[in-house]
């Protein structure tokens, strides 16, 4: 007679559950967002074109407004109006222009479609972009602040504290507008529109020059733009300019409308 085949050892449920599970697991949500934020910040700061928009162009605005007799408020040191316009320029360059261009290329290359299938997800992708934008803003303020200090800027703590909420609301407003441009237009159009709008907002939108220096009709239109509201609030914080509640309302309205528009119309693919 042949011997019976050997029986496989019996493993009860408790022993099976006690075995370590070596299957890969996604990192916790916060770690995923932080990793993506670091990646986005490195990409932005290592790109020569984006670095020029984020640092070089605002620095040129600072030096130009410090040396030329334009864009000033009566009785206010030139460096104070110059740094107010410079920081507003830096905010728009990163929150709007850079994010619109980077997101537009991500959408064209299928990155957004792919991210939707990963543990990071769309929410984590957007959260990482927001954090990367804020990281870049901190570096911008440090670099431009050092340059302004070399040109004679002596800020007070109260001014910097007052600037924080304005900066955060402005980041939301222009970040939402950048995402909206990236989510509605094709990539080639995003590149052209983002750069053109940036130049127009800085030159004619109440950033480099106070809206009060414009003709009445143009000044009234600039006051209704997010750039005009941001410029006036920056000057109120850093250059002893007049604070108007209307500018705060306009910037808040643009931020709220921009977020709502992104939620409603942003497209994650080109199709």
Image (cartoon, rainbow, N blue to C red):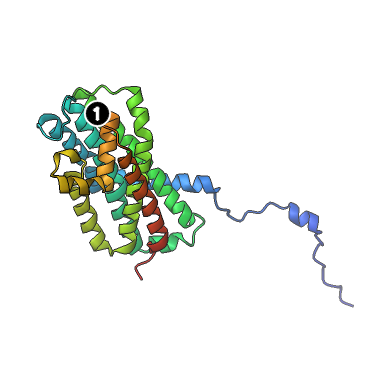
Q: In which quarter of the image is the N terminus?
A: bottom right
Give me the residue at 80% from left, 55% from top: 14
Q: Which of 186 and 236 is in front in this view?
A: 236
Give me the residue at 24% from left, 28% from top: 239
Q: Nearer the viewer, residue 49 or 168?
A: 168
Q: Position of residue 74 (x, y in %)?
A: 16, 28
Q: Position of residue 21 (x, y in %)?
A: 66, 54
Q: Which of 260 and 248 is in front in this view?
A: 248
Alpha-carbon neighbours of circle 1 within 10 Å: few (<14), some, or many (≥20)? many
Q: Of helix, strand and loop, which one carries label 1?
A: loop
Q: Which of 205 and 40 is in front in this view?
A: 205
On the question of residue 93 being in view, the answer is no
Give me the residue at 9% from left, 31% from top: 69
Outermost residue on the front side: it is 216
Task: Name the residue beneath numbered marker 1.
Answer: 239
Q: Quadrant of the C terminus?
A: bottom left
On the question of residue 20 being in view, the answer is yes
Give me the residue at 30% from left, 58% from top: 181
Q: Position of residue 36 (x, y in %)?
A: 43, 48
The image shows residue 202, relative to residue 193, as above or below, that is: above
Q: Quadrant of residue 84?
A: top left
Q: In which quarter of the image is residue 157?
A: top left
Outermost residue on the right side: it is 1
């Amino acid at each position: 007679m042949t011997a019976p085949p050997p029986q496989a050892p019996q493993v009860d449920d408790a022993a099976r559950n006690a075995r370590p599970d070596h299957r890969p697991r996604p990192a916790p949500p916060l770690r995923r967002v932080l990793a993506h934020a670091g990646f986005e910040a490195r990409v932005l700061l290592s790109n020569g074109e984006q670095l020029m928009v984020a640092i070089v162009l605002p620095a040129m605005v600072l030096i130009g407004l410090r040396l030329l007799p334009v864009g000033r408020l009566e009785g206010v040191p030139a460096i104070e109006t110059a740094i107010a316009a410079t920081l507003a320029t830096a905010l728009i360059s990163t929150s709007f222009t850079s994010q619109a261009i980077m997101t537009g290329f991500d959408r064209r290359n299928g990155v957004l479609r792919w991210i939707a299938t990963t543990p990071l997800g769309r929410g984590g992708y957007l959260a990482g972009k927001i954090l990367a934008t804020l990281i870049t803003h901190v570096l911008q303020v440090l670099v431009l602040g050092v340059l302004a200090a070399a040109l004679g800027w002596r800020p007070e703590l109260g001014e910097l504290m007052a600037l924080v909420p304005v900066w955060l609301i402005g980041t939301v407003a222009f970040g939402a507008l950048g995402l909206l441009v990236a989510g509605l237009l094709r990539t080639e159009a995003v590149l052209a529109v983002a750069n053109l709008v940036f130049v127009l907002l800085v030159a004619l939108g109440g950033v480099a020059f106070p809206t009060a220096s414009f003709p009445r009709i143009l000044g009234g239109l600039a006051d209704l733009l997010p750039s005009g509201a941001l410029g006036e609030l920056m000057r109120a914080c850093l250059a002893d300019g007049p604070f108007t509640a209307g500018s705060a309302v306009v910037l808040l309205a643009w931020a709220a409308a921009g977020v709502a528009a992104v939620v409603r119309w942003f497209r994650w693919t080109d199709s």
